[in-house]
């Protein structure tokens, strides 16, 4: 949910019916079982077999509102806006001496996320210094330690863009990152 402007603690699994029917539930709870015997149980039909226990009702309402909001904006417009900001950030950050940008070279294969490292600075220090400038980024290994080892870094700083960001935000990020070398 939080990846699309909704609340945390909820998500959606969307897939082909025939594949979902072959999946086994990983959690147990009410409404997911159709019949129970002493030695076995029969899973309920889709989607209930994957919705054990009391659903996160408030989160579902919030996610629904987020989906409606994004739908009203138009996902094509949202995607175009995010691509433009990402392209600007990639081109700008790649031109800063001492900054390495990671990810697919094709801008088409990317989401609205730009991972980067600043030579001589730990990603957490980069995040703290940017935070002092009013810029929020994520920092660390982003649940991808093997990838970070392969890239030869302890982690990265990661900027992400959405409908609420502007080209001015990207420019502020660029100027702040460019000024980090002087923090050494």
Image: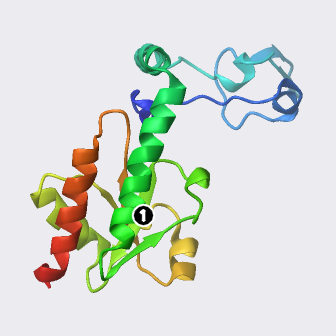
Instruction: Assign a secondary structure to mark 1.
Output: strand
Residue at x-position 36% and y-position 57%: 89
- From the viewer's perspective, is 57 left or right of 38? left
> In this rendering, is residue 166 above or below 172?
above
Q: Which residue is mark 1?
A: 115
Q: Position of residue 115 (x, y in %)?
A: 42, 64
Question: In the image, what residue occupies the spot 86% across and 27% down?
Answer: 21
User: According to the image, what is the colour scheme of the structure?
Assistant: rainbow
Position of 114 compared to 128: left or right?
A: right
Q: Is residue 89 visible?
A: yes
Q: Is residue 140 visible?
A: no
Residue 2 sits above or below residue 74 on the image: below
Q: Position of residue 180 (x, y in %)?
A: 18, 74
| Residue under the image location 49 percent in, 84 percent down | 152
In which quarter of the view is residue 18 placed?
Answer: top right
> How many circles with numbers are drawn on the protein?
1
Nearer the observer, 72 or 48: 72
Q: From the viewer's side, name the closer residue of 108 and 148.
A: 108
Up-down relation of residue 94 to residue 81 (above or below)? below
Quarter in which the C terminus is drawn: bottom left
Residue 106 % position (x, y): 59, 60
Mark 1 neighbour class, 10 Å CA radius: few under 14, some 14 to 19, many 20 or more: many
In-image side of 74 versus 164 (left or right): right
Which residue sits at x=15%, y=73%?
179
Q: Position of residue 177 (x, y in %)?
A: 23, 68
């Amino acid at each position: 949910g939080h990846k699309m402007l909704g609340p945390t603690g909820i998500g959606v699994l969307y897939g082909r019916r025939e594949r979902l029917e072959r999946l086994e539930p990983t959690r147990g709870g009410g409404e997911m079982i159709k019949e129970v015997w002493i030695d076995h149980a029969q899973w309920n039909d889709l989607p209930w077999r994957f919705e054990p226990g009391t659903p996160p009702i408030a989160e579902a309402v919030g996610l629904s509102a987020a989906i409606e909001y994004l739908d009203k904006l138009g996902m094509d417009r949202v995607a175009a806006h995010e691509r433009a900001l990402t392209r600007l950030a990639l081109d700008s950050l790649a031109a800063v001496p001492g900054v390495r940008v990671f990810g697919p070279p094709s801008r088409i294969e990317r989401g609205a996320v730009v991972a980067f490292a600043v030579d001589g600075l730990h990603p957490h220090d980069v995040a703290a210094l940017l935070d002092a400038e009013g810029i929020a980024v994520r920092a660390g290994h982003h649940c991808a330690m093997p990838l970070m080892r392969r890239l030869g870094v302890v982690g990265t700083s990661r900027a992400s863009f959405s409908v609420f960001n502007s080209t001015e935000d990207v420019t502020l990020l660029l100027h702040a990152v460019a000024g980090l070398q002087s923090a050494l």
